[in-house]
Image (cartoon, rainbow, N blue to C red):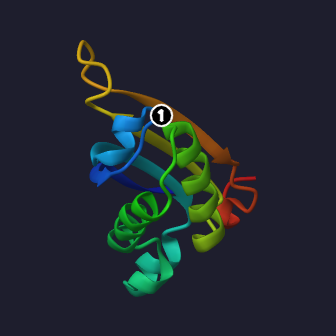
């Protein structure tokens, strides 16, 4: 299995449990690893046959801003599900950080993994 990744994607969105948080935009940082087979894209040098990280980055920003929630756990779960369904991703690891939540910490957040990282087809390789 190959991995397409996005690191340090910064999104300003409304998120938080407290009433004052619901009235402001806060910074979230997304790190995403997505398991896929990139060999078909590489053979023909075709973007349409791989995960387009620019398109996915835009989707993450739009999704975070269209789905206001209290908890980053909720956002991570819903976003992971949406990405898996939208792009047919077999496995993903999603880290959502909230850098300004705890002043004594550089960031706090959640990391989730969904799907299976095993590659059952092995691309015809290695029994």
Q: Residue at x 49, y 81 (%)?
A: 49
For the point 56% across and 63% down, the residue is 83
On the image, which quarter does residue 123 sit in?
bottom right
The reply to whether residue 72 is in sight is yes
Q: Is 97 drawn above or below residue 38 in the view shown?
A: above
Q: Position of residue 73 (x, y in %)?
A: 55, 38
The residue furthest front is 19
For mark 1, give the secondary structure. Answer: loop
- Judge by depth and name the residue closer to the eye, 97 or 88: 97
Measured as percent of width and height from the top left, residue 118 is found at: 69, 48
Q: Describe residue 75's horizontal placement relative to residue 108 as left or right.
A: right
Of 18 and 123, nearer the camera is 18
Q: Which residue is mark 1?
A: 17
Percent x, y of residue 86: 60, 72
* Image quadrant where residue 15 sits: top left
Rendered residue at 39%/82% (across/down): 47
């Amino acid at each position: 299995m190959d991995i397409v990744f996005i690191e340090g994607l910064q999104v300003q969105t409304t998120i938080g449990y407290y009433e004052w948080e619901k009235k402001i935009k806060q910074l979230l940082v997304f790190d995403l690893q997505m398991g896929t087979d990139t060999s078909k894209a590489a053979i023909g040098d075709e973007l349409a046959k791989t995960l387009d990280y620019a398109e996915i980055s835009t989707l993450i920003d739009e999704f975070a801003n269209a789905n206001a929630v209290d908890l980053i756990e909720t956002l991570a779960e819903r976003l992971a599900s949406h990405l898996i369904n939208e792009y047919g991703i077999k496995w993903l690891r999603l880290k959502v950080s909230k850098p300004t939540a705890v002043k004594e910490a550089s960031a706090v957040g959640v990391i989730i993994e969904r799907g299976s990282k095993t590659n059952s087809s092995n691309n015809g390789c290695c029994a």
